[in-house]
């Protein structure tokens, strides 16, 4: 959903995909929150939208990557259909859920590393890994995490473009006019940073 969530209230009750989906709630900006649908304004993000769906679909079969089901073309907008999750890793961290829970931390971190290794094996480099882009589902007190938001993802192992969230970016990707840096190493850096927060 767009960052101007209140102005998106006009969508409530509308249908998309020839009546298959009814919009019942606005979940908020960046929230994927049985299916969740993300709306993108095509005029503002056509290039990213195409790349995001293509690269997300390439890695979607992994058990710790949010399942991307399909894209629905709706004139000026595109809707992306995903599995629904309970929230994001940031909200779980802020609740001190991991405090003195070494086995839980290990379980979640192994899922993150496994998903990252899979994305890299498929030639997809996320470039914006952070707790807000790792979604969480919880069943019987067990957490499963899922990579989401492939809007900045690339297939290039090296890049000179600086993108992502600064506090989770590697130092070489932050330097103005920097030399090309490894997107692989940048992705590895990010979980190491938020695991220490």
Image (cartoon, rainbow, N blue to C red):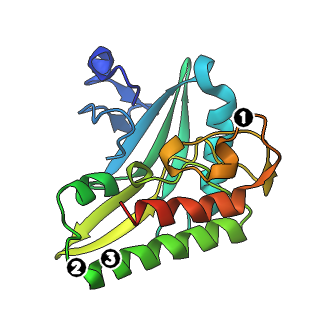
Left or right of residue 95: residue 114? right
Q: Quadrant of the rendered structure where residue 102 is? A: bottom left
Circles 2 and 3 in contact, beta carbons < 8 Å: yes
Residue 117 visible in the picture: yes
Eyeballing the image, is 102 above or below 15?
Answer: below
The residues bearing labels 1 and 3 have C-alpha atoms spaced at a distance of: 35 Å
Residue at the image position 32 percent from the left and 76 percent from the top? 105
Residue 69: x and y, percent?
A: 51, 52
Camera-side mark, 1 or 3: 1
Q: Identify residue for label 1.
A: 176
Per the image, label 2 sits on a secondary structure element best described as loop
Q: Identify residue for label 2.
A: 101
Q: Between residues 94 and 83, which one lies in front from this camera angle?
A: 94
Left or right of residue 32: residue 54? right
Per the image, label 3 sits on a secondary structure element best described as helix
Per the image, label 1 sits on a secondary structure element best described as loop
Residue 65 visible in the picture: no
Q: Between residues 85 and 153, which one lies in front from this camera angle?
A: 153
Residue at the image position 68 percent from the left and 63 percent from the top? 185
Camera-side mark, 2 or 1: 1
Residue 30: x and y, percent?
A: 39, 38
Characterize the local packing of mark 3: few (<14), some (14-19) or many (20 or more) Cα atoms within 10 angstroms: some
Q: Quadrant of the rendered structure where residue 52 is? A: top right
Instruction: Please report whichever mark, 1 or 3, sits nearer to the chain's N-terminal start.
Output: 3
Eyeballing the image, is 10 above or below 188?
Answer: above
Return the mark for residue 105.
3
Characterize the local packing of mark 2: few (<14), some (14-19) or many (20 or more) Cα atoms within 10 angstroms: few
Characterize the local packing of mark 1: few (<14), some (14-19) or many (20 or more) Cα atoms within 10 angstroms: few
The residues bearing labels 2 and 3 have C-alpha atoms spaced at a distance of: 6 Å
Q: How many labels does the image show?
A: 3
């Amino acid at each position: 959903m767009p960052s101007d969530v209140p102005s998106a209230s006009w969508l409530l009750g509308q249908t998309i995909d020839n009546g298959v989906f009814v919009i019942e709630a606005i979940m908020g900006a960046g929230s994927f929150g049985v299916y969740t649908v993300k709306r993108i304004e095509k005029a503002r993000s056509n290039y990213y939208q195409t790349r995001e769906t293509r690269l997300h679909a390439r890695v979607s079969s992994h058990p710790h990557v949010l399942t991307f089901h399909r894209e629905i073309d709706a004139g000026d907008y595109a809707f992306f259909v995903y599995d629904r999750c309970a929230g994001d890793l940031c909200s779980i961290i802020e609740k001190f859920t991991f405090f003195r829970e070494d086995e839980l931390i290990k379980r979640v971190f192994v899922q993150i590393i496994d998903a990252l290794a899979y994305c890299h094996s498929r030639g997809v480099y996320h470039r914006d890994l952070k707790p807000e882009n790792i979604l969480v589902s919880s069943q019987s007190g067990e957490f499963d995490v899922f990579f989401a938001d492939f809007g900045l993802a690339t297939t290039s192992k090296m890049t000179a473009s600086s993108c992502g969230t600064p506090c989770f970016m590697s130092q070489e990707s932050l330097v103005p006019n920097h030399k090309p840096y490894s997107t692989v190493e940048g992705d590895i850096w990010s979980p190491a940073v938020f695991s220490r927060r």
